[in-house]
Image (cartoon, rainbow, N blue to C red):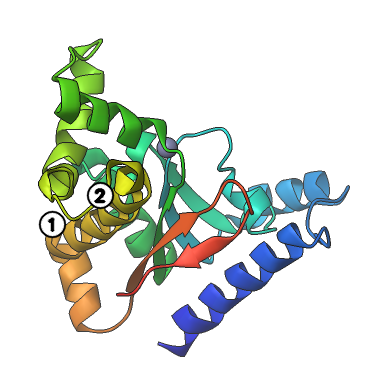
Amino acid sequence: MENSAAILQELLEGNDRFINGKTIHANDSSLAKLKNLAITGQFPKAIILCCSDSRAPVEIIFDQDIGDLFVIRVAGNVIAPSLIGSIEFAISTFGTNLVLVMGHTQCGAIRATLEYIAHAEAIATENIHDIVSRIKPHIFALTQNKDIKACDHMDIAVEVNVQASVNQLKFSSRLIESCLLKKTIEIHGSVLDLNSGKVKMLKD
Ligand SMILES: [Zn+2]
């Protein structure tokens, strides 16, 4: 599994470059690279499931280029069949062996779910309700815990939701389970802090 660890290290080093204003991939060679990849095909080094929030652009915050990352973005980085299918596709087609789930601070999907739990507010549409109903079971317990202050709910819920997505991924696909068993893939959770740009890895 050296490969996964090395790739994760590459991503975190890219995040450091982004934070320090020393990015190396956002340059004029991107079109040439795209044209080349159109001929050779893609070999993404990592699969990333993250939120659709416009402030969490994965390639930019990890300082990666076209062709580097296979990205699945969905509000609240929730797990649903088509999203698992996208990850299975990348694992089986490209042999990519690092899967990173990335949530972020100030996540609107988490906020909407917290408000839904607190006030039972009606959700605008059935499809938005589908997202909220996937997040709610993961974060409901913490909202009922009297030892956790309401002002801390948001940050804790973001982390808990990422960890829940990681755990769901590990046990909701035969392909993923078998790859984990053979140790050909690793799945990790992380949170992007919108204030600092830093991606924090969560404990497995
Ligand atoms: Zn979000």
Query: How many marks are shown on the rendered structure?
Result: 2
Residue 185 shows up from this direction: yes
Q: Image check: 193 left or right of 164?
A: right
Crowding at label 2, few (<14), some or many (≥20) Cα neighbours within 10 Å? some
Q: Which residue is mark 2?
A: 84
Amino acid at dot 2: Ile
Q: Earlier in the sequence, mark 2 or mark 1?
A: 2
- CB contact under 8 Å: marks 2 and 1: yes
Give left or right: position of 37 versus 93: right
- The quadrant in which residue 15 appears is bottom right
**Residue count near mark 1 (Cα–Cα under 10 Å), binned few <14, some 14–19, many ≥20:** some
Where does residue 115 sit, x and y in percent of width and height?
25, 26
Q: Amino acid at mark 1?
A: Ser
Look at mark 1 in the image and give the residue it sits on: 172
Which quadrant of the picture is home to ligand 1?
top left
Residue 66 appears in the picture as rendered: no
Rendered residue at 73%/53% (across/down): 36
Looking at the image, residue 15 lies above or below residue 179? above
Q: Residue at x 42, y 47 (%)?
A: 50
Front in this rendered view, residue 26 or 93: 26
User: Does dot 1 land on a helix, a strand or a loop?
Assistant: loop
> In the image, residue 179 lies at what x, y percent?
24, 74
Q: Residue at x 18, y 55 (%)?
A: 147
